[in-house]
Image: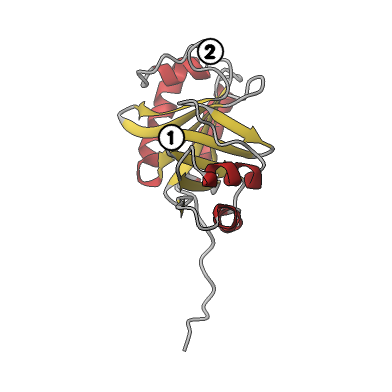
Amino acid sequence: MADTAPCAPLRSPLAHAAPRLAAATRASGGAVRLAELPFLTQVDVRLDAKGAAADAVGPALGLTLPTEPGTVERAGESRALWLGPDEWLLVGPPGGARELETRIRAAAGDEPVSVTDVSAQRTTLLVAGPRARDLLAHGCALDLHPRAFGPGRCAQTDLARTQVVLVSRDGGGAGFWVLVRSSFAGYLADWLLDAATEYV
């Protein structure tokens, strides 16, 4: 007989840290804003960037898969992050992974494509505010100056010795997304809170 017990509600990796992130944001007087954006849809796509699948998948998603290294294409609330010559990470609102996978596979048809829901693999930290770049620079070797890493850029890098995907969001004061593996999220949140004391 099938188990009919209700599933436990989803709990984000940083649910316990939410009050401390909010307190640091308040204490900084708006200099930095820290928050978790839990449960974002994250789908990893691999295909030939010059093949028929790429030509079909982009329009099916309503955006273009970026071909310039380290760039992001946006359509509404969804983003396509360039991770490699044949790899992209699609990020969107929570709960959309299955529908996204279906659309990609239907658009690709018989063309070779790999589509993997990695939504549970990472959580997302928002780091925003006028001092966001300074805060991240404490632990990241990338040149985060807007001329080098402005809106619409992304990179796989290390932040505080933790592997992350860093996304510079577009729009005034939009800040950054830091996509971090769930198992390292608590450590990285603690590091950000400690580094943010300079701005409190």
Look at the numbered disc 2 and give the secondary structure of its residue. Answer: loop
Q: Which mark is residue 196?
A: none
Residue 175, compared with residue 55, is above or below; it is above
Q: Callout 1, which amino acid? A: Leu
Residue in front for this viewpoint, 182 or 48? 48
- Residue 154 showing in the rendered view: yes
Q: Which mark is residue 83?
A: 1
Q: Which mark is residue 146?
A: 2
| Crowdedness near tag 2: few (<14), some (14–19) or many (≥20) residues, C-alpha within 10 Å | few
Of all residues, the one furthest to the right in this rendering is: 76
- Residue 17 showing in the rendered view: no
Question: Could you say where residue 52 lies in the image, as x and y percent from the top left?
Answer: 53, 45
Look at the numbered disc 1 and give the secondary structure of its residue. Answer: strand
Residue 39, compared with residue 24, is above or below; it is below
Q: CA distance from mark 2 to mark 1?
A: 20 Å
Marks 2 and 1, the one that precedes in the sequence: 1
Question: Could you say where residue 148 lies in the image, as x and y percent from the top left?
Answer: 48, 13
* Residue in the picture at 54% in, 62% down: 9
